[in-house]
Amino acid sequence: MARSGCIYGATGTYKTTAIAHFARYIAETTCKATLLLSADGGGWTPCDEEIAVGMIRPYQLDISHDRFLPSLVVIGRGYWPANSDELDPDLVNFVPIDWSEIGGMAVEGFTSIGTGLLLHCSQKALNTGENATSKFGREITVEGQTVMVGFAGNSKAHYQFVHNQLQGFTKAIVSQPFKYVLFTGIDKKVDDENRRTINGVSTPGRAVTNLIPTWVGDFIHAQDYSVPRKIKVPPPGMTASQCKPEQLIETDVYDKVCRYYFKDHPDPDTGILFKAKPRITHGAVAALAKEFPGGYFEPTPDEGFDVYLKTLDRLLAQGVLREDGTLSKWREMMDRKLGRVASAGK
């Protein structure tokens, strides 16, 4: 089973850049490429450098097409488009993933896929356990022909169907022999079944907001902050070429800084906690806190999530070799008590 993680946060918190960093980590540790399954509409421009050299192999999932759901299912079973640059989903040919070339996968993301599944249910007026809301249609002329375009709302069963498909896809992908699978998502505030306000990954409805952290290993919230900075600019109505240095006026600009939290932290506006967690042995929790005081790291254009993963690798590789040696001493004590003798070379 692959290690896994999810980075969730507002739009503009460099989640796609984190995928580029992630691909560099996979390339460095496995000498293999990373698959990028994107259902987001914003594109993958921050990953263009890695895509150009083959480090990332992307595929755009069309959430409005009839083949969206079956495509999601077969990808979860370990298949990938042989012609991933094909824009017509009807012409895409899925073949088994070549594990000698592929080491990681990024899925962008929970929010877009959930929206696509809900859209699929309403457009097809699917009956998924209870009657869907009434389907209706309107006529429109296309290329001289009158066609009927159908519409329908979503039933309660549709939301349960979406949640089941999201969970099934996540578990299927993580069961494939990747080194690591990275998911992304948008954050949102919802009221849970007990009417408590919680922060989590945005998906249709609210039932799985508390469950998604249990589907993955590392669960990281990307929190952005605006940091003011003063600069001098020309006064209103003048350009830089028209302005003399003594005419410049001081004004504030705001730079965005992101923190990627792997520990619960409060929303800076509401104080409501965002859930986050690392996937690491309990003996290394204190060491991880020393590496990243405050329970977060700040990504830059050059590095971020890859540094976090390398740190986890290093701490996990230490295994039972804790600073106080207690676990090693325990093993030695049990060996003596049970009369076990270590074999040569061990």
Image (cartoon, rainbow, N blue to C red):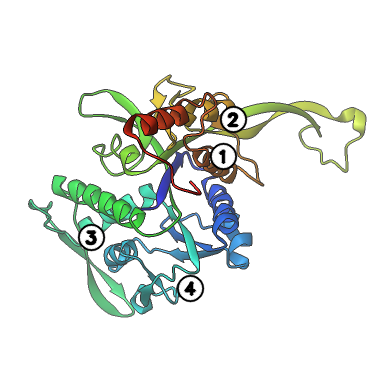
Could you tell which of marks 3 and 4 lies nearer the N-terminus? Answer: 4
What residue is disc 1 on? Answer: 311
What residue is disc 4 on? Answer: 85
Could you tell which of marks 1 and 2 lies nearer the N-terminus? Answer: 2
How many numbered badges does the structure rendering display? 4
Q: CA distance from mark 2 to mark 3?
A: 49 Å
State the SS at label 1. helix
Q: Nearer the viewer, mark 3 or mark 1?
A: 1
Q: Nearer the viewer, mark 1 or mark 4?
A: 1
Looking at numbered disc 1 in the image, what kind of residue is underneath it? Thr
What residue is disc 3 on? Answer: 123
Q: CA distance from mark 2 to mark 4?
A: 41 Å
Q: CA distance from mark 3 to mark 4?
A: 26 Å
Evaluate if marks 1 and 2 touch, with contact meaning CB atoms under 8 Å apart. yes
Tell whether 93 sits left or right of 166: right
Looking at numbered disc 3 in the image, what kind of residue is underneath it? Gln
Q: Quadrant of residue 45?
A: bottom right
Looking at numbered disc 2 in the image, what kind of residue is underneath it? Glu
State the SS at label 4. loop
State the SS at label 2. helix
Q: Nearer the viewer, mark 2 or mark 3?
A: 2
Disc on res. 291? 2
